[in-house]
Image (cartoon, rainbow, N blue to C red):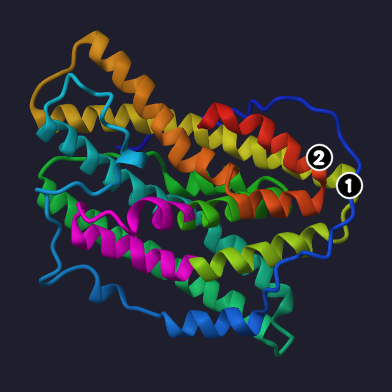
Amino acid sequence: MHQRMTPEMSTPATATAARGAMPATMPAYSYAAILAASERVQWRVEDLVGGDKRLDFGRPFMPASLARTEALDFLSPAERRTMNQVGGHTYLALFGVVEEFILPFVLDHARPRLSMEDEGVRAFLNFASEEAKHIHLFRRFRAAFEEGFGHRCDVIGPAEAIAKEVLSHEPLSVALAILHIEWMTQRHYLESVKDDGDLDPMFKSLLRHHWMEEAQHAKLDTMMVEALAATMTGDEVMRAVDGYLGIGGFLDAGLRQQTELNLAALERALGRAMTPAQRERFMATQHQAARWTYLGSGMTHPAFLETLGRLAPAARAKVEAVAPMFC
């Protein structure tokens, strides 16, 4: 089942501010170092999913800080664990969706550099190759999940339509959205997943290996954003930030639709329907949980805000003013 996403982009209006000068404290990232690090941590999908690698449905998949199922006190502990697992399916499935627009964008960014024999070309092509591998990983995970879970879990889409809408924005807007996603991934793993011993080991392994490669992507994305913004005026940067917030509004509408799909999946798994009051409470708490997981945690990441501040202090201030509604 596919849900049609409506590209509603409601963002608060703020005045355009002049761009500030970039301070000398820019990250000391280099293509050569990023490429070397990426080559050290390479892994194969076949080593993570399939064979004796199986999901344990007796354990939670998502850390409590992201799942936020405690508020669903009308569910038993076992039922909340089931909802946690539905959320885990959504988490990796949505990564597969967003990487459908990250992959072509990175390839488009690399294409003008193909005539140059340098580490930058290799780093971005390797970035694209890893994103394609991640898409394959998430598809394999979904097949393994559906086999073990035994009930259908739908995901918003189609991914191609979502990618088309996101990629219709100007390049810096898209690059900022991708940078948001990369730092969001880092935050989730390091702050919530890494030290959580209760999570299913296979699911945790998928998140760890994804994080290992995304750590390099966040650095490349930072360099991409800096390069795109280097020749832009202050007004152009602020319009790109508006576009980034527009992408966030579009994705937020999709997250609400996904919350409805998760409710339907949970009801199928439990074999019963929620009462109207329970459904209303589910939608309110789980949509806000999704907003924090996919939007707020990226918008407030210190490294993401630092990059915005280097582009224009007003850009950082604008995003910081919007972020609380997603937290």
Question: Residue 273: x, y in percent?
Answer: 15, 18
Instruction: For label 2, count other residues whose C-alpha is less than 10 Å away and answer few (under 14), some (14-19) or many (20+).
Output: many
Q: Residue at x 20, y 21 (%)?
A: 73
Front in this rendered view, residue 31 or 103:
31
**Cα–Cα span, label 1 and label 2:** 7 Å
Question: Residue 150: x, y in percent?
Answer: 10, 44
Instruction: For label 1, count other residues whose C-alpha is less than 10 Å away and answer few (under 14), some (14-19) or many (20+).
Output: many
Question: If you read the primary sequence from the N terminus, does the residue marked by circle 1 or circle 2 appear first?
Answer: 1
Residue 235 left/right relative to 280: right
Name the residue beneath numbered marker 2.
314
Q: Is residue 193 magenta?
A: yes
Residue 56 left/right relative to 194: left
Q: Is residue 267 magenta?
A: no
Vertical position of residue 68 compared to residue 159: above or below: above
Q: Tell whether label 2 touches label 1 (CB within 8 Å).
A: yes
Q: Which mark is residue 19?
A: 1
Quarter of the N terminus within the rendering = top left
Residue 238 left/right relative to 58: right
At mark 2, the secondary structure is: helix
Vertical position of residue 183 compared to residue 5: above or below: below
Q: Residue at x 52, y 31 (%)?
A: 326
Give the magenta-colored segment's residue range: 187-214
Q: Amino acid at mark 1?
A: Arg
Residue 231 left/right relative to 91: right
Q: Residue at x 74, y 74 (%)?
A: 112
